[in-house]
């Protein structure tokens, strides 16, 4: 990716460190609330990084020799991770046509779906509040780290609106009963309860120790085959939408297993285990 221009963004930034993309929200004057510009900025970064991932290219390195991406970390500057959708943007909905309001919702869904379906392993480092759309970002990532001040809420009902756009993603993370309860109460959930119900995956002692936990998770995921990581994510997407019978599902899983075992990455993983050496994707990362 050397010399490959990154998206030009105003309210968030992208820093690439080897095979890791670091995305930082930086609209601190509004607690990183999602306005049209920030939504567009994040969406463009997600699309740019997706196209340059191992999961999309099938290669550990790009033609110029730089590593293709395997993980993506979302952080935020300031006191809070994300205060949800910008209140002014939502207020303007009253003067817009149904078509214009739908276009706004489509922009938000582009963001959430882009994060949910991203080929890389995704990590969210959440400090302070993650409300409404912020909770949506949390729900779309693969591993969520919270700190003692973290509060998460599906806050839309407090404003008399619906958490519909983030709904599918929160539903998948929390399950039916958990999503229904929190969407109705719209109350803030602290880190311990968030851990208990599956909203977050890890709670650290302080914001200062967040980076250590991120590095630990990154170190672990880098030992997994990057195409196997993407395949696991794709498998869940298929299972979420499966409408066939059990026999068809079993047949599909057998086909996937056979495909992965016979793939170059699968053969490399099996061979390296038998030979007692590290697989190519670990050697490449270390090099």
Image (spheres, grey):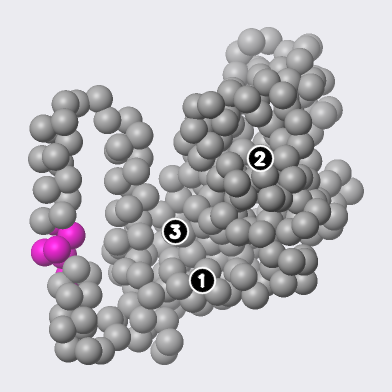
Image-based side of 258 in relation to 244, left or right: left
Q: Reading the chain from its start, which is encountered first: label 2 or label 1? A: 2
Of residues 46 and 198, the one drawn nearer to the viewer in this rendering: 198
Residue 238 is one of the magenta-drawn residues:
no
Residue where numbered disc 1 is placed: 218
Of residues 178 and 33, the one drawn nearer to the viewer in this rendering: 178
Please tell me whether mark 3 sits on a helix, a strand or a loop: loop
Residue where numbered disc 2 is placed: 135
Near mark 3 (Cα within 10 A), the count class, few <14, some 14-19 or many ≥20, is: many
The relative height of residue 110 versus residue 129 in the rendered view (above or below) is above
The quarter holding residue 279 reads bottom left
Residue range in magenta is 259-264
Which mark is on residue 150?
A: none
Q: CA distance from mark 2 to mark 3?
A: 20 Å
Disc nearest the viewer among 1 and 3: 1
Q: Reading the chain from its start, which is encountered first: label 1 or label 3? A: 3
Q: Reading the chain from its start, which is encountered first: label 2 or label 3? A: 3
Q: CA distance from mark 1 to mark 3?
A: 11 Å
**Where does residue 196 sit, x and y in percent of width and height?**
60, 46
């Amino acid at each position: 990716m050397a010399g490959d221009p990154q998206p030009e963004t105003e309210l968030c930034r992208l820093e690439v460190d080897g095979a890791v993309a670091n995305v930082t929200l930086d609209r601190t004057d509004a607690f990183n609330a999602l306005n049209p510009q920030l939504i567009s900025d994040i969406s463009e970064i997600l699309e740019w990084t997706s196209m340059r991932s191992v999961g999309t290219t099938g290669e550990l390195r790009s033609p110029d020799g730089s590593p293709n991406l395997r993980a993506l970390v979302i952080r935020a500057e300031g006191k809070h991770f994300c205060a949800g959708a910008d209140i002014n943007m939502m207020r303007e909905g009253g003067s817009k046509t149904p078509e214009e309001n739908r276009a706004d919702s489509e922009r938000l869904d582009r963001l959430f779906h882009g994060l949910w379906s991203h080929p890389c392993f995704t990590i969210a480092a959440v400090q302070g509040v993650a409300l409404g759309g912020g909770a949506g970002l949390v729900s779309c990532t693969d591993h969520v780290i919270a700190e003692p001040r973290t509060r998460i809420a599906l806050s839309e009902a407090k404003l008399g609106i619906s958490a519909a756009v983030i709904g599918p993603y929160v539903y998948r993370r929390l399950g039916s009963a958990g999503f229904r309860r929190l969407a109705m109460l719209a109350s803030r959930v602290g880190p311990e309860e968030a851990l208990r119900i599956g909203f977050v995956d890890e709670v650290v002692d302080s914001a200062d120790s967040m980076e250590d936990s991120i590095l630990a998770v990154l170190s672990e995921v880098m030992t997994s085959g990057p195409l196997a990581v993407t395949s696991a994510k794709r498998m869940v997407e298929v299972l979420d939408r499966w409408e066939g019978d059990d026999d068809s599902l079993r047949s599909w899983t057998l086909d996937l297993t056979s495909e992965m075992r016979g793939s170059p990455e699968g053969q490399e993983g099996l061979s390296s285990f038998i030979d007692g050496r590290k697989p190519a994707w670990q050697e490449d990362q270390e090099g």
